[in-house]
Amino acid sequence: MQLGKTFRAMAETVRVHRAYRRTCDELWALSDRELRDLGIGRSQIRDIARSGTRMPEG
């Protein structure tokens, strides 16, 4: 049973990381004006993506 738990945890980690990368990529693709309209600075993109995807800090 432990192997199943480990596999599920690994799959969840991969899923969360992919969501984080996708969010970062989508935000980086926006223009400065579009980001400004959203109230986001480029320096905030990683933090926003991390908080939106439950990605651990570090």
Image (tube, rainbow, N blue to C red):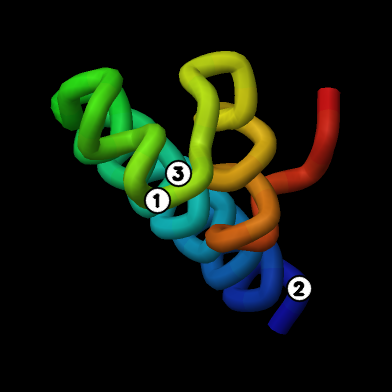
Label drawn at residue 20 = 3
Residue 2, disc = 2
SS under mark 3: helix
Quarter assignment of residue 4: bottom right
Q: Categorize mark 2 by other alpha carbons within 10 Å: few (<14), some (14-19), many (20+).
A: few
> Vertically, is 48 above or below 57?
below
Which type of secondary structure does the marked residue at label 1 adopt? helix
Instruction: List the residue tagged with mark 1.
Output: 38
Amino acid type, label 3: Tyr
Q: Position of residue 32 (x, y in %)?
A: 28, 20
Q: Indicate left or right for 19 with 13 as reference.
A: left
- Residue projecting furthest to the right: 58
The answer to whether residue 11 is above or below residue 41 is below
Residue depicted at 24% across the width and 28% down the height: 33
Q: Nearer the viewer, residue 51 or 56?
A: 51
Identified by mark 2, the residue type is: Gln
Q: Earlier in the sequence, mark 3 or mark 1?
A: 3
Left/right placement of residue 23 relative to residue 56 reads left
Relative to 31, say whether 50 is above or below: below
User: Which of the two marks, 2 or 3, is nearer to us in this view?
Assistant: 3
**Dot 2: element:** helix
